[in-house]
Amino acid sequence: MKKALVLGASGGMGYAIVKELVNRGVEVTAFARSINKLNHLFSRYPTVTIIPGDALNQNQLTQIARNKDIIFHAINLPYGDWETKLLPLTDSIIQAARKNNAKLAIVDNIYAYGKCNETVKESTVKTPHTKKGKLRLQAEERVKRSRVPYVLAHFPDFYGPYAENTQLNFTIQSVIQNKRAWFIGSQYLAREHLFTLDGAQALVNLSFQDEAYGQHWNIPATHPVTGRELIRLIRDLTGYQKKVSTVTTNMLRLLGVFDRQMREFVEMQYLNQQAVILNGGKYEKLIGPLPRTSYKKGLELTIRSYQGLEHFGN
């Protein structure tokens, strides 16, 4: 791999993927909507080309993907746009890859698995019960039918530098500002939260292996952890003393009366009642040990990014 295009490069996982590729000597084109965010993140990297734009613009995306060996898809649409834009976006990316003979590496979540009582393997039958889970499965099926070489990684909820729209970053942002903080969902349920730099390393590792293509892969976090444990670590790292309250499903329903994003968020709260835990054995059999940054270290690096410290990476 010599040249890569990263879509959604200004988001948490997109940023981490660009960083991982740069560290491996790959020439990267960082693509996202906001030129200001792209400049802030990547202007100091001489091997990164910054291009703003809209991935739904088929002609623009196809042009930008010229001469790229691989396209990393890390675009995270707002929930309110999924119904109208997720599948057209998937089609646009597939077409850009096909027309340029490029491979695809896709960041996906765990929604397509639906509710699961046991640790989830790649062989687990996907039975999504939510609107968004069904859309994610449809998008995955389109990729599989496309005949474009692909690797698709299922990630749990993640956190990390610039991962602004994630549940854990939602809590961290208020802590950094010394405001009253909130934690979404039960503080007693053990769930997975994947550090973005770990997820990026795992996906890039897969993208370098020919045997990995044409398959989906589960990338678990370091280990399941409760909200109480995370809050304790955040307090230790920041000295934060204020109460951290719980955002309940009923609160989200009430907020959803006025806010479409909150309304869309309600149906995913089953994940805060019964955790979906991923099995990473398939990855470890092909690649080796999964990247597993401790929660303490991952939170420290995330907090440093909010404090404006540039050199917070591994």
Image (cartoon, rainbow, N blue to C red):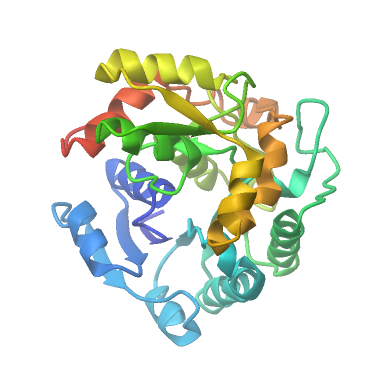
The number of callouts visible is: 0
Q: Nearer the viewer, residue 282 or 179?
A: 179
Give me the residue at 36% from left, 25% from top.
299
Give me the residue at 66% from left, 70% from top.
83
The x and y percentages for residue 165 are: 44, 49
Name above or below for residue 88 compared with residue 243. Answer: below
131 lies left or right of 175: right
Is residue 160 visible in this depiction of the protein? Answer: yes
Residue 190: image quadrant is top right
The x and y percentages for residue 41 are: 23, 52
15 lies left or right of 268: left
Is residue 150 visible in this depiction of the protein? Answer: no
Give me the residue at 44% from left, 62% from top.
69
Q: Residue furthest bottom?
A: 59
Residue 270: image quadrant is top right
Q: Nearer the viewer, residue 56 or 85?
A: 85
Q: The C terminus lies in which quarter of the figure?
A: top left
The x and y percentages for residue 189 are: 64, 21
Give me the residue at 56% from left, 19% from top.
225
Q: Nearer the viewer, residue 198 or 272?
A: 272
The x and y percentages for residue 109 are: 62, 46
Name above or below for residue 193 compared with residue 38. Answer: above
Residue 161: image quadrant is top left
